[in-house]
Amino acid sequence: MIYKISKKEGDELTLKQRLKKKLGNRYNVLKRAKREKFKRRGYKCIKYAIEPIGINDKLELDREGYLLDYPYATHWLIQLTYTKEKFPIKNENYSFHYIITVFPCNKIGGTHTNGPIHIYFSQAVELDRIISVFNQYLDNMINDCFWKNTI
């Protein structure tokens, strides 16, 4: 039996649809990446891409126990961010300017958590060098060996 809950006329969702919407789309990291491309201060997104999660990566996520945390994850969102702050992220004697983050999300960028599953920090180097690391991550995602080769 399927129960329908209605707030207004024409706005009917089943309980299963409401649960899926609540769990899968709490945060939209794809919209955030698009918005950060035009920022002037703080963290600025240089490049981003969304790729489907392959079968091998899905199995590795299940083996590591992340599949229960991300039940509706079907895509990877990878984002290269640059911080323009005077005092970037500091860890002892190093300061990191470039950050590569990876999020498991659904096809429209929705995820239930705001935190990434993988973060790569880099010091201030040439932009071409960090973009080559970004492209290497992206190639691993396309070839369905991201989890095995990078994490």
Image (cartoon, helix red, strand yellow):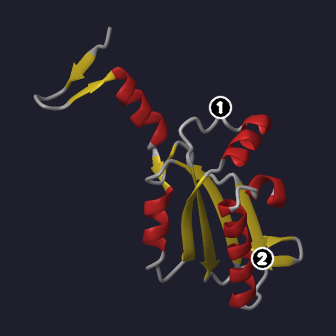
| Image point (43%, 62%), residue name | 31
Q: Indicate the quadrant where residue 42 lies.
A: bottom right
Q: Quadrant of the N terminus?
A: top left
What is the CA distance from the residue labelled 1 to the residue labelled 2? 30 Å
Query: In the rendered view, does 111 fall on the left or right side of 146?
Result: left
Q: Which mark is residue 68?
A: 1
| Image point (56%, 43%), residue name | 73
Locate residue 117, reporting x and y percent. Answer: 69, 51
- What is the residue that sits farthest to the right in this orientation? 93
| Image point (70%, 55%), residue name | 144
Mark before the other along the chain sequence, 1 or 2: 1
Q: Indicate the quadrant where residue 146 lies.
A: bottom right
- Residue 114 showing in the rendered view: no
Query: In the rendered view, does 126 fall on the left or right side of 48?
Result: right
Is residue 134 positioned above or below 21 on the image? below
Is residue 30 positioned above or below 5 on the image? below
Q: Amino acid at mark 2?
A: Ser
Mark 2 Cα-neighbour bin, 10 Å: few <14, some 14–19, many ≥20? some
Locate residue 151, reporting x and y percent. Answer: 82, 56
Query: Which of 32 and 128 lies nearest the eye of the viewer?
Result: 128
Locate residue 50, reporting x and y percent. Answer: 54, 62
Query: In the rendered view, does 110 fall on the left or right side of 148?
Result: left
Query: In the rendered view, does 2 fall on the left or right side of 39?
Result: left
Locate residue 145, reporting x and y percent. Answer: 76, 56
- Residue 75 showing in the rendered view: yes
Q: Which mark is residue 122?
A: 2
Q: Amino acid at mark 1?
A: Leu
Mark 1 Cα-neighbour bin, 10 Å: few <14, some 14–19, many ≥20? few
Query: Which of 25 and 142 lies nearest the eye of the viewer?
Result: 142
- What is the residue that sits farthest to the left in this orientation? 9
